[in-house]
Amino acid sequence: MTSSAQETALACIDGIQPLLSAWTRTIFDFGETAWREYQSAAWYVDRLKREGFSVEEGSGGMPTAFCAHWTNGDGPVIGMYGEYDAVPGNCQDAATVKQPREGLGLEAGGHTDPHSGLGIGSLGGLLATKAAMLEHGIQGTLRFTGEPAEKVRGSKPIHAAKGYYDGLAGMISFHPFYMLPLCNTARWDTHCGAAYAMIYRFICDEPENWVRASDGAPIPQAHSAVRAPGANDALMMMYMASKALRDSMLPHQGGWSISEAILTAGQATADNLPAGLAEIQYMIRVPTIAMAEQVTAVLDRNAEAAAKMSGCRYERHWVSKSRPGLANHAMAEITYAALSTVGAP
């Protein structure tokens, strides 16, 4: 049995379903990657203002983030959020064949997850909740945050650190999916794990200390002189060592992954100079913080060894850190009951 407020929310969703579909296609076609979601963020800000929300643009100092509020008197503050970042190199038209969106190549951004549906699905729930609160005099506040760069754990740790989740009675999270049993359900004990992302930067700024040239020049100019291996070699040794030692980072249990991306590899000139700068980024996804710290320690040792062997020094720059999700059985039961009432799409 549904309450009158739930009936109002369902009627709202039914009424705006064509709009939700069109809005999803709009965000899908933007296909903007992490920290570059300017059109997507602007679209949400405009839509939320039209729906009566007050919106802080660039929340937390992030140009493509936002935080929206709507209040209907004193009461609990309920949080929801939208994500809208796409994945580089996965441009796809809304078609049944592999083809990029018009005017773009296959290497442009595209929504594979899809965060285009995540954000608009959450927005639909937000608008339905607002309609029910207005119709039935339910007091409280709705807070809706725009979360860019989720794929690299970008905005949420920053929003959290800067207080944008403070005071929430609860936050409702939604993610579209296509594969049972991970869709059309609510999470119970298993939630998102910890994620660490960092960049290792190799710098060869004292190549003269590798082997002095015979003429005493600070940098070998003679093409017969030996030169320092340099930053490119350090990066490749880091890459291969971390691949080789992956089985020794953690026990063979639990679900975890480590992904890497070579960001830049500075090219040397024809004057026998070593590459001065190279960078590689790692993303670690693991069940616990202790596991993340263990993998980080292995990567740190690999970076130190690679730097020493190539006449370089290294720096580690943090991109993001996030903690594991916490189970909330009370909210899971309420959410699952609502899903059971509505039924599968």
Image (cartoon, grey):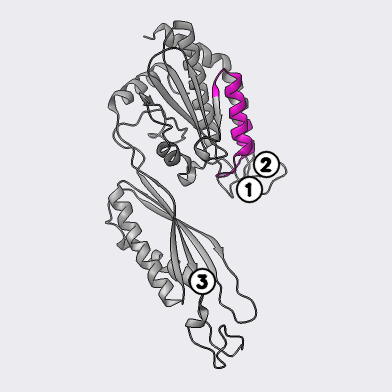
Magenta span main SS: helix
Where is mark 1, residue-wise? 108
Q: Residue at x 44, y 63 (%)?
A: 315
Name which residue type carries label 1: Ala
Closer to the camera: disc 1 or disc 2?
A: 1
Q: Nearer the viewer, residue 225 or 248?
A: 225
Name which residue type carries label 2: Arg
Q: CA distance from mark 3 to mark 2?
A: 37 Å
Where is mark 2, residue-wise? 101
Q: Are marks 1 and 2 in contact (CB under 8 Å)?
A: yes
> Is residue 163 shown left or right of residue 97?
left
Q: Is residue 51 visible?
A: yes
Closer to the camera: disc 3 or disc 1?
A: 3
Start-end of magenta stretch: 25-54
Instruction: Say whether disc 3 or disc 1 marks the residue closer to the N-terminus.
Output: 1
Relative image position of residue 310 (x, y in whole percent): 46, 76
Instruction: Say whether disc 1 or disc 2 marks the residue closer to the N-terminus.
Output: 2
Q: Nearer the viewer, residue 246 or 202?
A: 202
Name which residue type carries label 3: Ala
Instruction: Say whether disc 3 or disc 2 marks the residue closer to the N-terminus.
Output: 2
Q: Residue at x 47, y 71 (%)?
A: 234
Where is mark 3, residue-wise? 231
Closer to the camera: disc 3 or disc 2?
A: 3
Q: Secondary structure at mark 3?
A: helix
Q: Residue at x 40, y 31 (%)?
A: 165
Q: CA distance from mark 1 to mark 2?
A: 9 Å
